[in-house]
Amino acid sequence: MKNAVAAFALLALTTACDSGGTPAEPQEPARVLTAKDIAITDYVAASINDPGRAGINGDDPKRQPAEIIAFSGVKPGDKVFELIPGAGYWTRILSKIAGPAGHIYAVWPQQYARYSVGNVESLTALSKTPNYGNVTVIVLPTPVLSAPESLDLVFTSQNYHDYPAEFMGSHDPAVLNDAVFKMLKPGGIYIVIDHVGAPGTTLAQTAELHRIDPALVKQQTKAAGLEFVGELDVLRNPQDKYELEVFDPQVRGKTDKFALKFRKPAK
């Protein structure tokens, strides 16, 4: 636990002043967190062991849910916005942590939902069961996101790269990040998990390969006013050469992925 606290304290030191008392230019933290830096709380462990995940937990070795969720900092009572939740892998975990005092908004833009009708229907049915009654499924008519209330966490896994795609309307991800900034409470957290693209990957290449350069994600989120907090390395795969589209059988399920954490400034 001390290691985790120290690591995040180090990551937070991005607004130090220079010797003249003038605020120094924020420096991006150099440290990348590993699994040993992450403390798994009892409520995170309980959410991973939830019987409701039976049949959907086969990807746990690839997704490292305990470490990712602990890294996000989600806690009981939180209001969470999950963008494009798919079959609800993360939704179930987030729901159990947020509990009755919290809420999960599982959201699809219509442009994406039209290709995910089955997932929308199944997750809607799940939200109507007593065990997941704190989940609300929403299909928005536009990729410009909004939420019914201020949020503690916005979470998206392997979907950030879709915004430049033609089927989503070829949007710059600035549309997404600006909305996230508005939806988050001061101090709220934004988690982005996605497939790594080679350095310098353009948005056109991102749309084609379903990969994005993490440096570009950091640049884009900073432009929206969000602070970079840190990165967790549990999804990285150095064997991935970034040349193939993520659905290619040679790399599907084995891509190098990043997990980045951003924060809305508290003031």
Image (cartoon, rainbow, N blue to C red):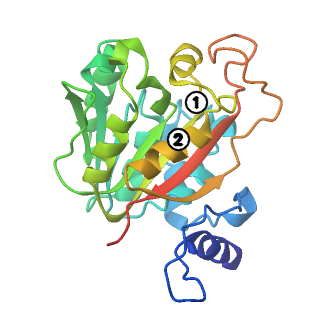
Give the residue furthest to the bottom: 20
Would residue 224 be seen by someone viewing this image from the given angle?
yes
Closer to the N terminus: mark 1 or mark 2? 1
Q: Quadrant of residue 123?
A: top left
* Image coords of residue 44 (percent x, y): 52, 59
Left of 205 or right of it: where is 176?
left
Number of the label disc, if any, that sits on residue 126: none
* Image coords of residue 150 (percent x, y): 22, 57
Residue toward you, 2 or 43: 2
**SS for callout 2:** helix
Q: Are marks 1 and 2 in contact (CB under 8 Å)?
A: yes
The residue to which callout 2 is attached is: 217
**SS for callout 1:** loop
* Image coords of residue 45 (percent x, y): 56, 58
Under mark 1, the amino acid is Ile
**Which residue does the image show at 21% across and 29% down from the upper left?**
140
Left of 7 or right of it: where is 171?
left
Number of the label disc, if any, that sits on residue 212: 1
* Circle 2 Cα neighbour tier, 10 Å, few/some/many (<14 / 14–19 / ≥20): some
Residue toward you, 61 or 113: 113
Give the residue furthest to the right: 239
Quadrant of the image containing the N terminus:
bottom right
Under mark 2, the amino acid is Val
